[in-house]
Image (tube, rainbow, N blue to C red):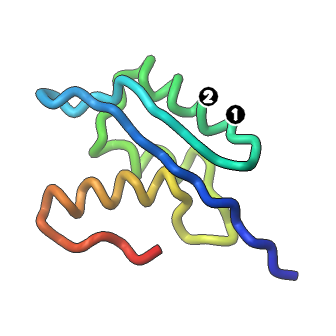
Amino acid sequence: MEVENSKVKLRIVYKKEDKKIVGCQLGSSYDATAIIHFFSLAIQKGLTMAELPLVDLFFMPHFNQPYNYVTRAGLNWLKQRAGIKRLKE
């Protein structure tokens, strides 16, 4: 049984100096309250952009994809900082 995943638009706001996450905007056609809760905890704990892909992998994995959209956003950020092309979607 194939299930189409909903499209998600994600904008993460972080401090330029120390890369700590300070905000997030999320747009999707499905209920994404768990991700909003995840980002509220990330902000409260002072999570950095570099830590984002590691923490989310263990926090809320999606088993139909090796990486979910939050992990991919963090990995894409790391790759851009290293000058590597974006991950394939």
Residue under label 1, please give it.
33
Return the residue found at the far bottom: 1
Q: Residues within 10 Å of mark 2 (few under 14, many from 20)?
A: few
The quarter holding residue 61 reads: bottom right
Up the image or down, 84 lies above or below 22; here it is: below
Left of 42 or right of it: where is 32?
Answer: right
Q: Quadrant of the N terminus?
A: bottom right
Q: Are the two marked residues, 2 and 1, in contact with CB atoms closer than 8 angstroms? A: yes
**Helix, strand or loop for disc 1:** helix
Left of 13 or right of it: where is 42?
Answer: right
Left of 34 or right of it: where is 44?
Answer: left
Please state which amino acid type lies under the numbered disc 1: Thr
Q: Residues within 10 Å of mark 1 (few under 14, many from 20)?
A: few
Up the image or down, 63 lies above or below 8; here it is: below
Return the residue found at the far top: 44
Percent coordinates x, y for residue 16 in the rendering: 15, 31
